[in-house]
Image (cartoon, grey):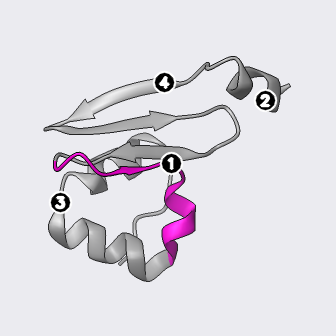
């Protein structure tokens, strides 16, 4: 059911100061950063990659919280 919804393009989208987050029904979080880079699946970055991205784009913390993800400490 969730996979079908994702294939149909059903997602929630929100803008966080230029960072655009899309939360998909499967739990996948897609982020387009203010510099134009698009990460289609934030889970592929891993813990260290997400921490580094937060250093460069602090508004990512808001996007992660909005999507219900755990914020790396």
Q: Earlier in the sequence, mark 2 or mark 3?
A: 2
The disc placed on residue 11 is none
Residue 2's disc is 2
Which one is in front in this view, the residue at disc 1 or the one at disc 3?
1
- Image: 34 above or below 45: above
Circle 4 SS class: strand
Q: Earlier in the sequence, mark 1 or mark 4?
A: 4
Q: For mark 3, what is the residue? A: 58
Q: Position of residue 9 (x, y in %)?
A: 62, 20
Q: Residue 1: image x %, image y %?
A: 86, 25
Between the C-alphas of marks 2 and 3, the distance is 30 Å
> Where does the image place residue 45, in percent across and percent down from the top left?
48, 70
From the image, tell me which residue sits under label 1.
40
Labelled disc at residue 12: 4
Quick check: 8 above or below 50? above
Which of pointers 4 and 3 lies earlier in the amino acid sequence?
4
* Residue range corresponding to the magenta coloring: 35-46
User: Regarding mark 3 in the picture, which secondary structure is present there?
Assistant: loop
Q: Farthest right residue?
A: 1
Callout 1: SS: loop
Q: Nearer the viewer, residue 38 or 42?
A: 38
Does residue 36 lie above or below 2 as drawn?
below
């Amino acid at each position: 059911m969730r996979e079908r919804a994702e294939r149909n393009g059903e997602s929630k989208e929100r803008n966080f100061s230029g960072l655009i987050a899309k939360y998909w029904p499967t739990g996948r979080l897609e982020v387009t950063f203010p510099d134009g880079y698009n990460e289609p699946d934030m889970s592929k970055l891993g813990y260290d990659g997400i921490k580094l991205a937060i250093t460069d784009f602090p508004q990512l913390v808001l996007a992660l919280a909005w999507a219900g993800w755990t914020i790396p400490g």
